[in-house]
Image: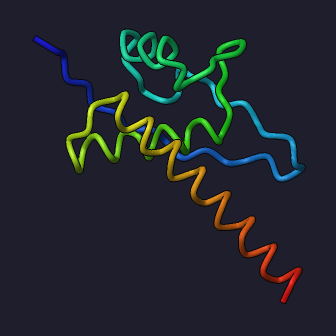
Amino acid sequence: MMKKYSLSIYCHTLNLEGEPAGIPVGSLGLHPEMLERLVALGILEVRRGMVTPDQVRRLQKIFRLRGTLGVNLTGAAVIVDLLERMEKLEDELERLRRTFL
């Protein structure tokens, strides 16, 4: 039987000087097994016990999809990745429209 995990990721203040501030992975409230799974799937990259604010935002989206739509962890990660790619493409399309119109 698959274990269910709850997740409450706390809000963190971002470094306003451009360099992303590291967020201690322990402050995310993740169960150690869930943390291992997220790292193994490539969803989180932990360096010196820290993750980036972008990773935390992605993780929040992933767990929101899991909670609201019941999507599994891998599926939610794929959805978030595709949404981010679409957003980048839309931004690029808008930039090109402004350039050529």
Q: Is residue 5 left or right of residue 40?
A: left
Q: Is residue 32 left or right of residue 10?
A: left
Q: How many marks?
A: 0
Q: Residue 77 location in percent, x, y?
A: 44, 35
Report the residue that reaches farthest toward the left: 1
Q: Residue 84 location in percent, x, y?
A: 58, 51
Tell me the quarter of the image containing the C terminus: bottom right
Q: Which residue: 53% across, 42% down? A: 81
Q: Which residue: 63% across, 17% down? A: 46
**Closest to the observer, 36 or 11:** 36
**Closest to the observer, 38 or 98:** 98
| Picture quadrant where residue 9 is located | top left
Q: Which residue: 87% across, 48% down? A: 18
Q: Is residue 23 left or right of residue 17?
A: left
Report the residue that reaches farthest toward the front: 100
Can you say whether 65 is above or below 44 in the image? below
Q: Residue 78 location in percent, x, y?
A: 44, 37
Colour scheme: rainbow
Can you say whether 61 is above or below 25 in the image? below
| Picture quadrant where residue 76 is located | top left
Can you say whether 44 is above or below 47 in the image? below
Q: Residue 32 location in percent, x, y?
A: 40, 11
Tell me the quarter of the image containing the N terminus: top left
